[in-house]
Image: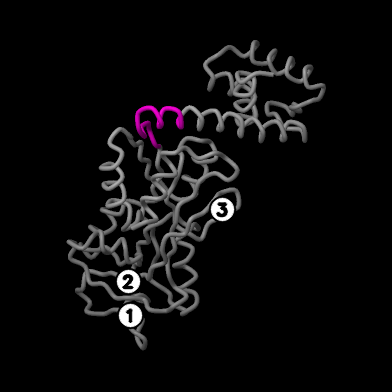
Amino acid sequence: MDLRQLKYFIAIAEAKNITEAAKRLHIAQPPLSQMLKQLELELGTTLIERQGRQNRLTDSGKVLYNEALKITKQLEETELLVKDTNSGIKGNLALGINTLSAEELVPSLVSFQQKYPAVTFDIHQNESDVLCQMIRERQIDIALIRFPLQVDDFDVIYLNTEPFYFICDGSSKKGPNPADYIGIANSKLVLPSTKGLGVYHSIIEYLAKFQLNPHSISSCSDINLLFQLVEAGFGTSIVPKSLLTQQIHRKVEAHPLEDPLFNSSYGLITLKNTYQSTVVKKLITEITSL
């Protein structure tokens, strides 16, 4: 059993289909199928059970998959450590950013670049659940996400918890306060998240808690467009404090929602039980130190 076989087996396990795995590896399907047969013969056990067009890992296959990930990641880490020792930290870092982002991000990246100018970035912005899947598929190394979200298979570093604000164009001169939530109840909300997930779910729970019934609820993951719509009187919104801070130039009226149970948490995630490159570790240190 060699490293090439392990990498090929990882591709088969993750694609759940030999044809798809062959496409990912840019090789023909027959040699890949033959490699799998040879590996199973060498180990004396079945690694993959064929179920129609998809494959399922056997118990032995699951063990090999997990160990293969550790071995290949360890090799990558070793290569990076040797290169770091010889010529300083360099390489490429694939970073996922939730659409709502966070206040710490820009100053952290600027500071990181000043310390490690040889590192380049591929920055991907998407909803938190999509970023989680991208990490599972190893399309990105680390992600900044918003909670609540299922993160059992990730290592999580919580960064901050912040309050929400109700925002409007100010024309109604109404907004929520301890005795009057008519600003929310009579408005057309446009929420900054995908329906049913993360921040959207938190806001819906908050509305239910206070028995608030807006005229309508829409969603918009494009933050610039969201604030433009609020400015123009198209609708109102509920956003976390850091998002409001980033859009400080916008002509909107903001009202804090001061209930202690209504807040937005965010943090960094990496895939559990996998080796982290030195670049990823340094970025985590940079972000958490601010």
Which amino acid type corresponds to the residue marked 2 in the rendered image? Answer: Phe
Give the answer, above or below, for where 213 lies relative to 30: below
Q: Is 83 in the magenta?
A: yes
Other-residue count near label 3 (Cα within 10 Å), few / some / many at <14 / 14–19 / ≥20 = some
For numbered disc 1, what is the local secondary structure? loop
Q: Residue at x 45, y 28 (%)?
A: 82
* Pointers 3 and 2 in contact (C-beta within 8 Å): no
For the record, the magenta segment spans 80-93
Other-residue count near label 2 (Cα within 10 Å), few / some / many at <14 / 14–19 / ≥20 = many
Q: Is 243 in the magenta?
A: no
| Percent coordinates x, y for residue 46 in the rendering | 79, 25
Front residue (pair 64, 219): 64
Q: CA distance from mark 3 to mark 1?
A: 33 Å
| Percent coordinates x, y for residue 173 in the rendering | 22, 79
Would you name the residue on which mark 2 appears?
166
Q: CA distance from mark 1 to mark 2?
A: 7 Å
Give the answer, above or below, for where 16 lies relative to 199: above
Q: How many marks?
A: 3
Which amino acid type corresponds to the residue marked 1 in the rendered image? Answer: Pro
Would you name the residue on which mark 1 appears?
176
For numbered disc 2, what is the local secondary structure? strand
Disc number placed over residue 151 in the picture, else none? 3
